[in-house]
Image (cartoon, rainbow, N blue to C red):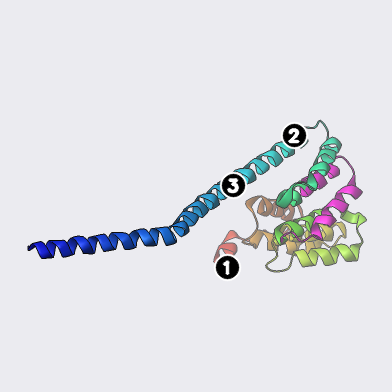
Amino acid sequence: MSDSDSFIEEVTEEVRRDQLYKYVRRYGWIAVVLVVGAVGVTGFLEWQKASLAADAQARGDQFAAALDADDPAARAEALAALTANSGPAAVIVELRRAAELAEAGDVDGAVAAYDGVANSAAGPVYTELARLKSVILQGTAMDAAARQAELESLAAPGAIYRPLALEQQAISALAADDKDTAIALYAELVQDSESTDALRNRASQVLVALDAEIPAMSQLLSE
């Protein structure tokens, strides 16, 4: 390589270096901002995650402490204080509070709590459960027509708690001395693929007590 070629390469390299420095001085702050921003966002996300975990832990501790009370009335009172500050878990706290009120003998208070959840914006898993619990708790004290309409809605095809609602319909039929309807409903429960083993066993036992035929399991498996 001649001296002239070597000189040209050195000059070219120097020009490139100068251009690079100019770019760094002109645009380097952008890279710094991006790096600082990325670090800041990562730090914020980590802080948010830790904060949410701490809040969830605190609410869980408060919930456990409320359930440590000696009697259901005291537990219900302690849970009432948590409902407003439980965030997304408030509906679960309220359902448990309703159960504690029912155990304490405060049927009206429990029904009101269940109805509050049933009429809330919570998902159907919670609202339909609250509706069913309310109907069960009220029993024969509930208006017969209203009870029947509510159970028919809860026992509609595709309803989340359909088998349990069917069982309540069967119980109502027995209470009204409508043995044929009760037998038909219990037989349906035995054959319903959504019925749990415990529910299917209960239905079978009632059918035996009513001296009715229990549908063969083969019928269930063939559906």
Residue displayed at 71% across by 52% down:
88
Q: Which residue is mark 3?
A: 49
Question: In the visual, does 141 lie left or right of 44?
Answer: right
Task: Name the residue carrying label 2.
Answer: 65
Marked residue nearer the N-terminal end (3 or 2): 3
Which is more N-terminal, label 3 or label 1?
Answer: 3
Residue drawn at (76%, 61%) of the image: 121
Residue segment shown in magenta: 94-123
Judge by depth and name the residue closer to the eye, 178 or 168. 168
Q: Amino acid at mark 2?
A: Ala
Q: Is residue 102 magenta?
A: yes
103 and 24: which is toward the camera: 24
Query: Looking at numbered disc 3 in the image, what kind of residue is underneath it?
Result: Lys
Callout 1 environment at 10 Å: few (<14), some (14 to 19), or many (20+)? few
Please give the residue where the numbered disc 1 appears in the rendered image.
Answer: 223
Say which of 34 and 50 sits in front.
34
